[in-house]
Image: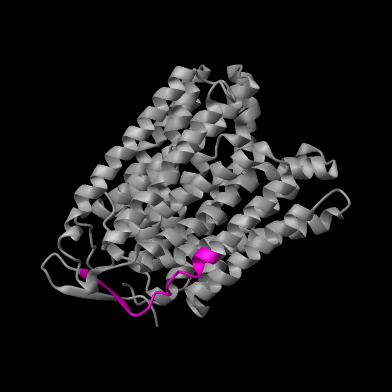
């Protein structure tokens, strides 16, 4: 762990690693969200229908759910330096194939594969946790998440202009291709300029790659239950694309996917059993235990925070346009304030956690989240527009500060499993987004906001069971010696 001073303007030691890592995450979000700003040009160029455009948007997020779990495991095993570099390089390929697509099928396959770059987030969580002490960790993770997340807004602002500069019907292809080149080039820069840990520190790896380790019988059952929503939401996505909804593929294909998801869950159950069956006969020593309920609570909170952010960002321009009779351009500008808050809110949530305690800050932010969304449910055309915008931005502060506060806790649960824990928690954010968007498709905007507020209340109740990280966590070095890692003052 590096003892140098926390100085955002520095570019040496741990600060260099932080800056390079948030920029790696920033690039993943530029690539992941390079579709939305280009939609009109892509639709015209490929001759897509409205239904096909919606399918591209859906496919763009689907793979991120399992990818975050898998990439989290790979990060814990092989280290964030190698995994982040490979992710940036490998996912440049579907970015290029999308830019070169001539028809809907090619575009759809490329977009589905590109969803995997959304897993980049969990890699940096582990990297940052290796370089920063517990009293700076929330702030550092918040900067990493908040500044990296801004990549989606940067794509929206820059790519249309870049496409115009290239000009012609293929301008969008060159603009999207540029994001792929940026990802590929930075993969080499990242690999050459970071290391997994400060010099002399140990990188702790899990005993097994196949599944998350737990340390009690009850936690084994809890883990199996918490896996179900991740498969259920993929089944929901399949239903939304089936003949019953969008009709993007046949009923036979939908049934085949549902059978496949069931089989995958059973395979994962077997892997979890193989990794953890020893605890049924030989209890884990107290010093090596962690409580899986800590992970479960953070999953629920990230479902409500990041899940609602992704869903609200998707619907807010339309909400402002219809509620206040604004043009699409003005509505988009007004709604962008919600995403802009990420630059300060997420680091702010992490900083508050470092200064005033993890659990107490999460309780306050989750309560603010519930109140904020309840207030959003009250907004109608009779409100002055500026008050509605202020309400949306205030709500956004609690959402994104809450995200920062969640990931101020994640690295303090079990060091060698940080990637897997971050992967599962991050995946729950995507599960929340898909769930909330399904709700939005079925109800009006006010009810949609009330549903999010209700889940925030459930998150607040779950949070009461979270235990403030205290003292030290124990890890075993490769030579068998014990290392104690501080998690609190």
* Residue 60 seen in this snapshot: yes
Measured as percent of width and height from the top left, residue 174 is found at: 53, 29
Which residues are the magenta region? 461-475
* Residue 84 seen in this snapshot: no
Q: Residue at x 11, y 69 (%)?
A: 480
Does the magenta run of residues contain 70?
no
Q: Residue at x 41, y 56 (%)?
A: 21
For this rendering, which residue is in front, 416 or 304? 304
- Drawn side of residue 34 relative to residue 21, left or right: right
**In the picture, which quadrant includes the N terminus?**
bottom left
Measured as percent of width and height from the top left, residue 217 is found at: 27, 60
Compared to 107, does 327 lie above or below? below
Residue most toward the bottom? Answer: 489
Residue most toward the left? Answer: 479
Q: How is the image coloured?
A: one colour
Q: Quadrant of residue 417?
A: bottom left
Q: Quadrant of residue 281?
A: bottom left
Q: Quadrant of residue 408?
A: bottom left
Measured as percent of width and height from the top left, residue 93 is found at: 39, 31
Does the magenta run of residues contain 464?
yes
């Amino acid at each position: 762990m590096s003892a140098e001073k926390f100085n955002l303007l520095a570019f040496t030691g741990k600060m260099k690693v932080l800056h390079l890592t948030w920029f790696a995450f920033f690039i993943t979000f530029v690539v992941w969200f390079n579709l939305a700003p280009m939609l009109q040009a892509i639709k015209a160029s490929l001759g897509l229908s409205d239904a096909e455009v919606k399918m591209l948007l859906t496919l763009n997020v689907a793979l991120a759910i399992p990818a975050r779990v898998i990439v989290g495991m790979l990060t814990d095993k092989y280290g964030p330096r190698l995994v982040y570099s490979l992710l940036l390089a490998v996912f440049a390929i579907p970015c290029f194939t999308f830019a070169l697509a001539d028809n809907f099928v090619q575009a759809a396959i490329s977009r589905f594969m590109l969803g995997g770059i959304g897993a980049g987030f969990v890699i940096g969580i582990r990297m940052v946790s290796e370089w920063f002490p517990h009293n700076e960790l929330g702030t550092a993770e918040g900067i990493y998440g908040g500044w990296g997340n801004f990549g989606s807004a940067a794509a929206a602002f820059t790519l249309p202009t870049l496409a115009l500069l290239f000009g012609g019907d293929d301008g969008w292809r060159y603009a999207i291709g540029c994001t792929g080149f940026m990802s590929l080039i930075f993969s080499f820069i990242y690999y050459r300029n970071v290391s997994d840990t400060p010099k002399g520190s140990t990188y702790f790896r899990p005993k097994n790659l196949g599944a998350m380790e737990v340390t009690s019988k009850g936690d084994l059952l809890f883990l199996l239950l918490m896996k179900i929503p991740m498969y259920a939401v993929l089944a929901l996505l399949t239903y939304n694309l089936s003949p019953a909804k969008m009709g993007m593929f046949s009923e036979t294909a939908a049934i085949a996917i549902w059978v496949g998801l069931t089989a995958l869950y059973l395979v994962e159950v077997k892997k979890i059993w193989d990794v953890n069956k020893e605890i049924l006969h030989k209890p884990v020593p107290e010093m090596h235990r962690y409580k899986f309920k800590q992970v479960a609570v953070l999953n629920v909170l990230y479902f409500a925070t990041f899940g609602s952010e992704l869903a609200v960002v998707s619907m807010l321009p339309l909400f402002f346009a219809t509620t206040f009779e604004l043009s699409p351009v003005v509505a988009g500008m007004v709604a962008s304030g919600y995403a802009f808050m990420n630059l300060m809110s997420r680091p702010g949530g992490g900083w508050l956690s470092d200064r005033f305690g993890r659990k107490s800050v999460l309780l306050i932010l989750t309560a603010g989240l519930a109140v904020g969304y309840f207030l959003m449910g009250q907004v109608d055309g009779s409100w002055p527009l500026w008050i509605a915008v202020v309400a949306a931005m205030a709500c956004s502060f609690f959402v994104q500060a809450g995200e920062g506060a969640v990931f101020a806790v994640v690295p303090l649960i079990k060091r060698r499993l940080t990637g897997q824990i971050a992967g599962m928690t991050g995946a729950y954010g995507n599960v929340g987004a898909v769930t909330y968007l399904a709700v939005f498709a079925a109800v009006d905007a006010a009810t949609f906001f009330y549903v999010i507020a209700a889940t925030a209340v459930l998150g607040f109740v779950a949070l009461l069971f979270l235990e403030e990280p205290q003292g030290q966590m124990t890890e075993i070095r490769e030579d068998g010696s014990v290392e104690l890692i501080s998690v609190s003052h």
